[in-house]
Amino acid sequence: MNFKLKIWRQANAKAKGKFETYDLKDASPEMSFLEMLDYFNSTQIVQGKEPIVFEHDCREGICGCCGLYINGRPHGLMNRTTTCELHMREFNDGETITIEPWRSAAFPVIKDLMIDRNAFDKIMQAGGYITINTGAAQDANTTPIPKANADDAFDAASCIGCGACVAACKNSSAMLFIAAKVSQLALVPQGKAEAKERVSRMVAKMDELGFGSCTNTRACEGECPKGISISHIARLNREFWVAKLND
C-alpha cells in the first residue's frame, strides 16, 4: 500500500511547528499504525533524514502512550481502538493521512508527535490513591460489594490515561479522566475514607494545570478507546459537591 503522510514536525514546545508531507510506498496492510511509522522512520534513516519522534510502549492498547490525532480524530477512525491497535488495512491505498499530536496547553509538545502528559501524573499525585493502611489482602467476599458497584469500578479502572478525552474536548477538559479515577475508588469501601480530600485535590490540580471545563458535549466519551461513560462525570460532580458541603 502507498500513502501520502502529512505529519506535524516541531522541534520543541516553544518552536513553531508545521506539517510536512512525505510519500510512503510498499507499506503492508497488516502493519499496525505504529509499525507503519517505524517503517517510515527506517526509510528516513536510510536517506540520511531525521526520523519522526513519536511515543509508544506496550503496543497492546493498555499503556496510553501512543495517542495521536489521525485524520482529525484521536487514535484514528476506529471506535474503541488505540493508535497501536489501528491497522493500515483500515485505510485506502493512496490515501493522504494527516498525523498530529494532542492539542492542549496542558500537554506541551516535546518533539514532533510526542507530548508531555505529565499533567495527568500530577493529578494522580494530588489524590488518585489510597493511603489508608487496610492490612493484608482479605479472603474473597469478606467485604461484600454490590455487583453493580464492582462492575462500574472495574469499567472506570480501565482508563489508560491516554488523553484522548482531552484531545477530543473543545475545552481540553480532563473531567472524564479524573471522573474515572475518582469513580474506581469511590465505589469501593477502601476509597471512602479519603473521598472528600481526593476529589477536592484532583479537581483543584486540574484547574491549576490549565485544563478546561466540561460542557457535556460527550466528545470525550465518543473518542475514549475504552468506552468510559460520562456517567462517571456525574458521580465526580456528586462527590465534589458533597465534599464542599461537608467542609
Image (cartoon, rainbow, N blue to C red):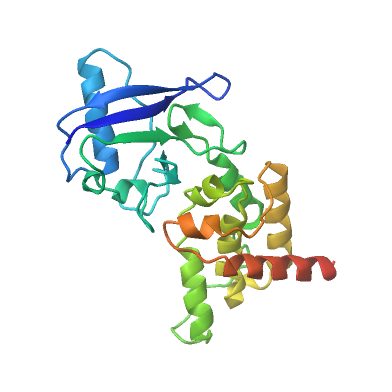
Left/right placement of residue 44 relative to residue 215 reads left
Task: Answer above or below: position of 123 versus 197.
Answer: above
Of residues 6 and 186, the one drawn nearer to the viewer in this rendering: 6
Give me the residue at 20% from left, 42% from top: 31
Q: In which quarter of the image is the N terminus?
A: top left
Give me the residue at 40% from left, 47% from top: 75
Residue 140 rendering spot, x and y as whole percentages? 43, 84
Left/right placement of residue 157 relative to residue 178 reads left
Residue 27 rendering spot, x and y as whole percentages? 17, 35
Q: Is residue 112 visible?
A: yes
Residue 100 rendering spot, x and y as whole percentages? 44, 34
Give me the residue at 55% from left, 72% from top: 135
In this figure, what is the number of numbered marks? 0
Residue 233 rendering spot, x and y as whole percentages? 62, 64
Left/right placement of residue 111 relative to residue 178 reads left
Q: In which quarter of the image is the C terminus?
A: bottom right
